[in-house]
Structure formats: structure tokens, C-alpha cells
Image (spheres, rainbow, N blue to C red):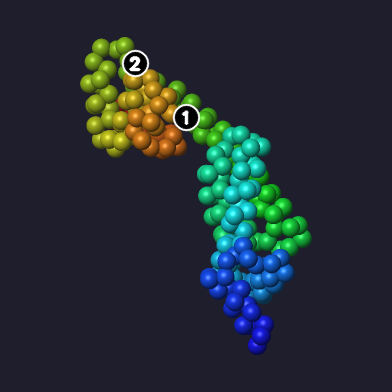
């Protein structure tokens, strides 16, 4: 009975997570491994959330290719959805979290490389489909080609191809993330490719 009462105290939101001792956290883990309840998982997430920011700072400093704030947000999601449910002990949780963070950074770096390759291939393909900037009447031809395209995709296309802006510059002009610019460019490329193969161009 006393054990149950103590567990309720440990799970009480009014009890600060940072005030829990190592033994108390270990006890929550033991109960979580038996019950797998959402309440216990969320309590563990509260306990380890501050550590995720520390892990994000370490990884951002080490790899210098990721934002610590973005990485911290991703790690917090990973903490709740994967780290806690899949942790089985062995290494300390801090070590386990750091390894998960390393895998996350590696995935991001690989994804970024693939995206850069996609953008390069899109730009090469678009240069074959769209009229050159110097061509007479290129703006009218552009309007014809993009008449049934989403106006946001067409705007990105115009700024990138005909105004010569980089992804970062286009993102600043439109106040959207760089990833959104790349996605819209790819969508525009797919649209024009489909239109050309369907003999609409």
C-alpha cells in the first residue's frame, strides 16, 4: 500500500521531475517496463527532457551541420515515441540518448545530401523545359507553362530560375523555410515533366 502511495507521489505533476532521486527514477523505469503506461512514459519524458537539450548542444557542436534548437525538438519527439519505449537498460539512458541523437544527425546529413542532389537534378531538368531568361517573350511563355500550376510553386520557380535567387534568398523573400522552397521546386518540376509527357507543353 505504501509502495503504491509513493508511486502516486512520484507521478504527481506537482512533484518536480528534477527533484526525483536516481533510485526513484529507477523505480519508475521498473514499473514502466512492467506496465508500459502512457502516464509513466510521460513522467520519464519530463525527467529526461532537460538532458535532451544538452545532448542536442553536444551534437550540434560536434557536427556543426545541424541547429541545436531543431535537433532538441526532434530529440524530444524521439524521446517520447522511440527512446523510452525501446530502452531496455544496459547502457545508461544518457549514453543511449546520445547514440540515438548521433543516428538522427547521420540521417539528417544523408537526407540533406539527397535533397541537394534532387535540387541539382531539378534545376538541370527545368533549364531544358523552361525558356531561357534571355529569350524574347520568356515571361509570357512562363505564364503559359505555369497557368495550371499552384501559384506558390510558380512563384518559387520564377524567383529561382528568372531572378537567379538562391534557395536561402528565396526562402527569405517568401518567409518560409529552405526545405519548403526545395519541395515547391521539386513539385513544379514534376508538374512540368508530367505536362510535357502528356503533350500539354
The front one of 48 and 184 is 48
Whole-percent x, y for residue 187 in the image:
38, 36
In the rendered image, the quadrant that contains the C terminus is top left
Is residue 130 at least partly visible in the picture?
Answer: yes
Residue beneath the point at 62% across and 62% down: 18
User: Marks 2 and 1: CB-CB under 8 Å?
Assistant: no
The front one of 12 and 45 is 12
Q: How many numbered marks does the figure carry?
A: 2
Q: Which residue is mark 1?
A: 119
Q: Which residue is mark 2?
A: 132
Is residue 193 at least partly visible in the picture?
Answer: no
Can you say whether 72 is above or below 13 in the image? above
Around disc 2, counting alpha carbons within 10 Å, would you say few (fewer than 14), some (14 to 19), or many (20 or more)? some
Secondary structure beneath disc 1? helix
State the image quarter where residue 146 is shown: top left
As measured in the structure, the alpha-carbon distance from the residue carrying label 2 to the one carrying label 1 is: 18 Å
Q: Earlier in the sequence, mark 2 or mark 1?
A: 1
Residue beneath the point at 43% across and 29% down: 168
Which numbered disc covers residue 88? none
Whole-percent x, y for residue 150 in the image:
29, 37
Image check: 143 left or right of 15? left
Image check: 144 left or right of 197? left
Whole-percent x, y for residue 175 in the image:
36, 35
Whole-percent x, y for residue 198 in the image:
32, 33
Amino acid at each position: 500500500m505504501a509502495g503504491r502511495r509513493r508511486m502516486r507521489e512520484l507521478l504527481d505533476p506537482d512533484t518536480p521531475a528534477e527533484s526525483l532521486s536516481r533510485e526513484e527514477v529507477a523505480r519508475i523505469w521498473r514499473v514502466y517496463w512492467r506496465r508500459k503506461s502512457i502516464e509513466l512514459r510521460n513522467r520519464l519524458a519530463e525527467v529526461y527532457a532537460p538532458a535532451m537539450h544538452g545532448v542536442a548542444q553536444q551534437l550540434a557542436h560536434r557536427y556543426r551541420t545541424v541547429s541545436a534548437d531543431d535537433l532538441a525538438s526532434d530529440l524530444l519527439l524521439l524521446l517520447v515515441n522511440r527512446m523510452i519505449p525501446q530502452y531496455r537498460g544496459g547502457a545508461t539512458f544518457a549514453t543511449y540518448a546520445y547514440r540515438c541523437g548521433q543516428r538522427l544527425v547521420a540521417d539528417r546529413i544523408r537526407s540533406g545530401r539527397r535533397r541537394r542532389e534532387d535540387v541539382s537534378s531539378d534545376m538541370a531538368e527545368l533549364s531544358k523545359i523552361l525558356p531561357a531568361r534571355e529569350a524574347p517573350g520568356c515571361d509570357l511563355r512562363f505564364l503559359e507553362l505555369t497557368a495550371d500550376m499552384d501559384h506558390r510553386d510558380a512563384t518559387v520557380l520564377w524567383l529561382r530560375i528568372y531572378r537567379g535567387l538562391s534557395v536561402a534568398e528565396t526562402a527569405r523573400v517568401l518567409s518560409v523555410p529552405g526545405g519548403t522552397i526545395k519541395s515547391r521546386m521539386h513539385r513544379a518540376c514534376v508538374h512540368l515533366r508530367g505536362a510535357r509527357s502528356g503533350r500539354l507543353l
